[in-house]
Image (tube, rainbow, N blue to C red):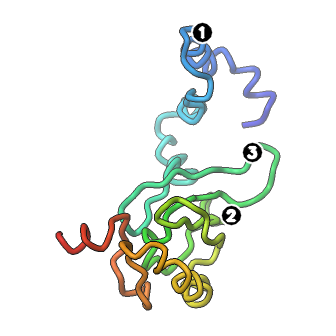
Amino acid sequence: VDDQSLIASAGNWLQPVLRHVASGKNVAKVDLYSALRTLLPWEHAHDFDALVPERLQVPSGSRISVAYPEIGQSGPAVVSVKLQECFGMDTSPRLVNGKLAVQFHLLSPGGHPLAVTDDLVSFFNGPYAQVRAEMRGRYPKHPWPENPWDHVATAKTKNRLNRQ
């Protein structure tokens, strides 16, 4: 799909989007992903979802939005997720048949950036210890295990996790 093809077929895929905008829908909330997906034959739509997923499931079970590089830009896909939700994740996923790296923006329980990595194994085996030392006093209600490989991945506090 190139710019010329998209422009030539805009009447098919863009018209429904423009109707929503004309009816008062906020442009920022327009779902271009679904609109572009309609360009694919139905039998290939599943392939598209596997190659370029809209969300990535992390070990906690949460499905986190994936931000892709802008058209014409290079760089990794970005997933911003709370660090505790990635405990035990022993491989860093790659998308588009392994061609596109996923960069994790690991967040504190309060949603503040803690680390950026495209190699979770190296992060948990190295810098995690320093992050843990700094954050466990700041966020004592959340798990900060010494060994993140053996701890359950969670978005919950320690108390809510123990109640289950």
Marking on residue 99: 2
Amino acid carrying mark 1 in the image: Ala
- In this rendering, is residue 90 above or below 101? below
> Upstream in the sequence, badge 1 or badge 3?
1
For residue 77, side relative to residue 133 (left or right): right
- Residue drawn at the location 57% of the way across and 27% of the way down: 30
Residue neighbourhood size for the residue with mark 1, other residues' Cα within 10 Å, grouped as few (<14), some (14–19), many (≥20): few
Q: Are marks 1 and 3 in contact (CB under 8 Å)?
A: no
> Upstream in the sequence, badge 1 or badge 2?
1
Marking on residue 22: 1
Q: Are marks 3 and 2 in contact (CB under 8 Å)?
A: no
The front one of 75 and 84 is 84
- Residue drawn at the location 46% of the way across and 65% of the way down: 109
Question: Which residue was labeled with disc 3?
Answer: 70
For residue 71, side relative to residue 38 (left or right): right
The front one of 136 and 75 is 136
Q: Are marks 1 and 2 in contact (CB under 8 Å)?
A: no
